[in-house]
Amino acid sequence: MERGLHYGVGFPVEVVMQASPAPAPRFSPSGLPVAALLLLGLVLRLIHLGSGLWYDEIQTLVEYARLPMGRILTEYPTTNHHLLYSVLARASTGLLGESGAALRLPAALLGTASLWAFWRLALKVTDRREALLGTLLLTVSYHHVWFSQNARGYSGLLLFTLLGTTAFLRLLEDPRAGWPALAWYSGCMALAAYIHPTAVALPAAHAILLGALAVTSRKAGARALWRPAAGLLLAGCLALLLYAPVLGQVVKTVTAGNPQGAETAWKSPVWLLLETARGLSVGLPGGWVTLASGVVVFAAGMASFFRKSPALLWLLIGPALVTAAIVLALRHNLWPRFFFFSAGFAVLIALRGGFAIARTLFRARGPALATAGAILAVLTSAAMLPRAWRPKQDFEAAARFVDRERSPEDAVVTVDLTVFPYREWLGRDWDVARSEAELETIELGHRRTWLVYTFPVRLQVVQPGIWNRLTARYRPAAEFPGTVGGGAIVIMVSPPTPPAR
């Protein structure tokens, strides 16, 4: 059993070398399955790549990807502006033409690259069997494919998280790791922050671990911490350099409250837990039953990693905990997608838990049975992939329905989060209602009124008058589901207005 450095009682950093074989030669046969998985992963992420953009992607296209590069780099009006992704989207749409597929192509490529990054990290913290099974599971994962077809910074954040964690472990363990390794870690952390500002939680979690190691280490061990500490310092400098043109705007935007001060359910930790559970159940084979079983398996995996090294367990779960603390402190909306960067860590923990439980229950036959269970999970997960290729929000289908059903005397109204997509993206000159009084005025001037809305959890709070009028006077006409939680496009229609006498 190889061991890395040991920093004091309670925080051993033989976290990754234990039970891990020596690195494989660069062109070993074991690399062929991984190369095949990367090719398969790319294909799966290109299928229906341009299907059904959702609100945030539309905003990325209209407000950022269409801008000159100079403005992209020097303006930060909203947190929806994932700077590095906007740069990549501008380059992609500029080369390939404006389309949903071109807008999402950077996400697909970054997501595919994250499969390789997961494989590299898994080889450091577990054995080859779990590493390969984990890579296979992510390759056909509903959630991984979904985010790899989401024109946002999340798949890139996952990539840089995995690369940065692997680099950080090397800086902790390897006395031979020099300035190139330090620069690689710093670059990964800076790019992670540049593609999504919540990435600051990752180096923050690393800093917490370094502090704990410094306190619990002997003097010689503490001196060896200078490499990761220098890496953190350099990462901060690089991130500040990247953000320098917009730093003041970022601080102002990130610390701003909800629009109109609305206290939506999106700010509730309870909503976060329920929505996370719902989202996971949609993409897991077996749905809620698998999710409930997964809690037990995940707990077993955390216990196994804790026995191996508390330090390693912190590296796997600490960033998500720090992210939650930061978002709660800022009173920002608690969206589950903020935690997708931990998907690779979650897979490692779950696989470890499955193997640990199998070994406990079945002894020598445990690994074989756990492998069979993991392959079954892969097959059932692959069968659910078509769900990931459905529209995230189907604004276009809803528009076609209204065009077909309305008469020339009818009005079509958009409210709240349907205004921007229809006016700025699809170019519809439909009416806009920002209050119940405006909606009533529109109704009086037309035979019937068609109203299109989405995300009712927000509409009820931001425009309660309109919501109350909808529920009291309108009837449902059609609903176009999407894979974004709560993002179905709903069409309501009012009764015909009696003709004036």
Image: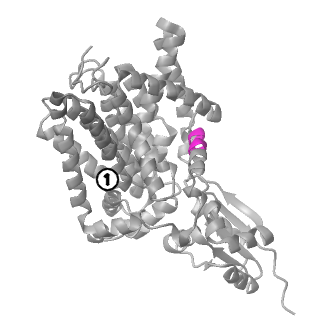
Is residue 280 shown in magenta? yes
Q: Residue furthest bottom?
A: 501
Residue sitting nearer the eye, 189 or 114: 189
| In this view, 341 is above or below 453 | above
In the rendered structure, which amino acid carries the disc numbered 1?
A: Ala
Write the residue at 30% across / 19% down. 18
In the image, which residues are magenta?
Answer: 276-282
Q: Is residue 437 left or right of residue 267?
A: right
Q: Residue furthest top?
A: 364
| Residue density around tag 1, few if under 14, some if 14–19, many if 20 or more, within 10 Å | many
| In this view, 143 is above or below 488 | above
Q: Quadrant of the N terminus?
A: top left
Quickly name the residue at label 1: 193
Q: Is residue 192 left or right of residue 472?
A: left
Is residue 394 shown in magenta? no
Q: Whole-percent x and y of residue 273?
A: 57, 45
Write the residue at 19% across / 35% down. 225
Residue 434 sits in quarter = bottom right
Q: Whole-percent x and y of residue 200?
A: 33, 51
| Mark 1: secondary structure | helix
